Image: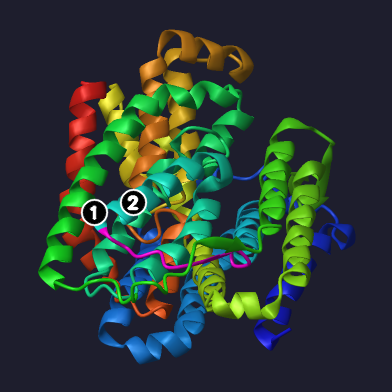
Amino acid sequence: MTRGKLSLLFLLLCLTVFPSVALASEAGHGHGGINLGEVLPLYSCIPFAGMLLSIALFPLFAPKFWHHHFGKISAFWAAAIAIPFLIAYKGQALYEFLHIILADYVPFIILLWALYTIAGGILLRGSLRGTPVVNTVMLIIGTALASWMGTTGAAMLMIRPFLRANNYRKYRTFMVVFFIFLVANIGGSLTPLGDPPLFLGFLHGVPFFWTFNILPHMLVAVGILLVIYFVLDTYFYKKEGVTAPVEEGVKEPLKVEGIYNFIFLGGVVGAVLMSGMVKWGEISVLGVHRGVQEWVRDGLLILLGVLSLIATPKKLREDNDFTWFPIQEVAYLFIGIFLTMVPCLLILKAGAKGQLAFLIETVKEPIHYFWMTGMLSSFLDNAPTYLTFFSTALGGFYPGMAEAQAVPLLIAENNIYLKGIAAGAVFFGACTYIGNAPNFMVRSIAEEAGTPMPSFFGYMLKYSIPFLISTFIVISFIFFV
């Protein structure tokens, strides 16, 4: 194993066994203290804005510096919020940081590592050449897979064959962007396995197959974007005037190697589903309570990733252009994003009592839920954003009623509101590189493969605003007006 592989694996193992050596700290659990979300000022979100601007601007104006020091920049912004926050709010601040690390970041990075590792052991060989038709079919396949193996799993499985099929093409940037739109985001709309906010809804009482209610919304979005993609790909294909560099008579037939890794992928899906369906009690880690089944899931994911590393020949991964840099970049950057995001999430969760009350109080109609959930999900973690507006809807329609009774009523009587929340949380994740975890990983893999990718703002201004936002406006008029 390489040094990078060993260090990352050691980190994941430490995170998993950590509960056995940690005890609860009642003072840090937030009991008896003030509600931080109600007292935090908006300027406490400045480090989060600084983190986003660093991701947006450094690769554009100082790419070499960024490439070598992005981990230090992430650490700087994390310290910029952690130090004053801990000084001001002590135990409560410590609890919030520990909670987002142990309950959110740890399972997040373990799941990504497992999927990235396993999918990197599956290699599609053969003379597959990226014509407009072939590319569109690959996008359809990836989009269909995303709801069943997660957007991250589908993206990691499909991105390398997609890039390899188009390695002879001159204009490839738009291809990867539409791959992010469809496979890494919108494709995960149909089941709780597809995207974290839907899984969170499942844990809070939304039936597993309820998400098929947003199938029409997904089909409209996918249909519009695929048509746009096919038109663009056809235009650039003709403009390039090149043909696939394969001589007649020497075409290599398509074949998949490392197919045993599909068993490990199935294990990942099963482990995630298990963690949402069983209750084995809780373990308290430094005051942060997590279910035993969640730690078991994380351990299983690491085991599955290790088994993939053992079972897959090194040569196969080399042929698949597999490196550890994309997952390392995500791990370093997202710890900074998660930590600097803490004040923003606390203010958002405070609802009408927080500094973002002016936003929460404007959310009344289904279209408001769709757009507000979506816009915040583009920059914040879409899972807590989903839960915030899910709770807002429950409280607005069924105040004082227990969640177990309120959720079935919301589905039966005000289904359209939940559709707006679910579709907004999943769809809008494609609007920025940080809107959903696989976005950044796909970008990093594409750049490693030699495909130039737009900057943070370039991605938004050139692609997501003209194509995605226009699509969402159409969806709004069809389903939410």
Question: Is 124 in front, or is 83?
Answer: 124
Note whether residue 355 is visible. no
**Magenta region includes residue 162:** no
Question: Is 269 in front, or is 331?
Answer: 269
Q: Tell me the residue at 24%/63% (across/down).
A: 174
Question: Is 268 in front, or is 229?
Answer: 229
Cβ atoms at labels 2 and 1 below 8 Å apart: yes
How many residues crowd mark 1 within 10 Å: few (<14), some (14–19), many (20+)?
Answer: many
Q: Tell me the residue at 68%/75% (across/down).
A: 8
Mark 2 = which residue?
181
Give the magenta-colored segment's residue range: 120-131
Q: How many marks?
A: 2
What residue type is disc 2 on?
Answer: Phe
Residue furthest to the front in view is 249
Coordinates of residue 319 in the picture (x, y in percent): 56, 78
- Up/down of 470 relative to 440, above or below: above
**Magenta region includes residue 125:** yes
Q: Main secondary structure of the magenta part?
A: loop
What residue type is disc 1 on?
Answer: Ser
SS of the residue under disc 1? helix
